[in-house]
Amino acid sequence: MINQILHGDCLLILKKVPTNYVNLVYLDPPFFTQSKQTLKSKALREYSFADNWDSIDSYLDFLSPRLYEIRRVMKDNSTIFFHCDRNASHRIRVLLDEVFGYERFLSEIIWTYRRWSNASRSLLGSHQTIFMYAKTVNYTFNQIYQDYSETTNLDQILQRRERDKHGKSIYVTDFGGRIVLNGPKKGVPLTDTWEIPFLNPKARERCGYPTQKPLQLLERIILLASNENDLILDPFCGSGTTLVAAKLLNRSFLGIDSSREAVELSRQRLHNPIRSESKLLKAGREAYKNLPDDVVQILRGLPVKLVQRNSGIDAIHNRFLGGKPVVLRVQRSGEDLTDAAKKLQQAGRKKDAAMLLLIRTEQDERQQALLDVFPTDVHVIDSLALSVHSSIESLLQTQNMRTH
């Protein structure tokens, strides 16, 4: 049963799998959402399944025998990653303690992501939970390191520390009083909070399955808890993301699903695996900040939301007029005021803005001759620096006139 995708109830199929057989298990079973999951692929093929249960107890009764079978087929060096959400995570944790033992709990991983807002009267859900348990104390674990935070003093990390007689941490020095280095650093060990973007609806990796997870999430799990040529089991394989990740990372796989459509979809993806690159993970969140520092400083303190990727709009005011936005733009250094106004006007019209506010940062007398081409719906206000400068100049002129 290696490199296969089997159709049927995983409880029945797992009974045919030898004991101590797999190295890593990831399962993303039906959630306790009490709703139907439906989505169409780019080819307009519809995939759907129901997450409806008579009660939370009936849901746990469904999971329990399957988890015991999963534990049986796991090798002594294996781990299990159970993917769930807030609706039943508290009860699932208790069930996992019963099956694997409380002492085998390793981590509660929080997968966090950004989602569009909703209209429900509650906090916007932006994470899911993955419980990590081991079968024994001899589990496979490959430490993954992340870059240090920008606030970390790397020069201090390179220095060796020790505790003095009072228990205080101090830097180690040699007989000559020179600092003793602590050797090269790999980075910060991976934490239990993972920020991996939810799959973009237009991502090439998208296949139309309702609960499809990003490959980057499964790749991280597989790299963390298995080695090359290990066997990865996914008893609720759905669209086959786990299997594709295993294949790309030179692991073997065994997938099971009760849906024929899901099994066929998994086979298609394995035949032609597609992996989407996350620009956010690759470049970092800071790479999306395109506004110049001087523009940000001018807008700082105003009740606005900054707009990072729009050449005509720099910010949207927190207050709307008649249900429509008030948009702002800051004149760039050396930029013609009329050109700035036209950019704001064009972008503002696309957003159906109620008001267009252009913040002038430079005084240019030539603008007086261009009033006939200046957009009439753009309101110009001076920046604080320009207002102060203009006031001082006006005061100086008045004083000069009095002295003459």
Image (cartoon, grey):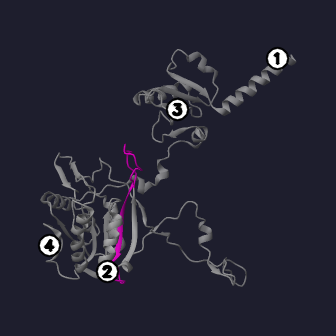
Residue 13, numbered label: 4
How far is the residue under mark 2 from the one under mark 4?
Answer: 21 Å
Q: What segment is highlighted magenta in the picture? A: 113-139
Type of amino acid under label 1:
Met
Q: Which residue is under mark 2? A: 135
Number of numbered discs overlaid on the protein picture: 4
- Compared to residue 385, the image places residue 264 above or below, namely below
Q: Residue at x 21, y 73 (%)?
A: 65
Type of amino acid under label 4:
Ile
Label 1 close to label 4 by CB (< 8 Å): no
Q: Is residue 338 visible?
A: yes
Q: Nearer the viewer, mark 1 or mark 4?
A: 4
How far is the residue under mark 4 from the one under mark 3?
Answer: 61 Å
Type of amino acid under label 3:
Leu
Q: Is residue 141 visible?
A: no
* Image position of 216 (left or right of 287): left
How far is the residue under mark 1 from the one under mark 2?
Answer: 90 Å
Q: Position of residue 220 (x, y in %)?
A: 36, 66
Q: Residues within 10 Å of mark 4 (few under 14, many from 20)?
A: some
* Image position of 248 (left or right of 155): left
Residue 328, numbered label: 3
Camera-side residue of 393 and 21 = 21
Q: Residues within 10 Å of mark 2 (few under 14, many from 20)?
A: many
- Compared to residue 46, the image places residue 31 above or below, namely below
Q: Nearer the viewer, mark 3 or mark 2?
A: 2
- Dot placed on the residue nearer the N-terminal end, 1 or 2: 2
* Quarter where residue 394 is shown: top right
Residue 401, numbered label: 1
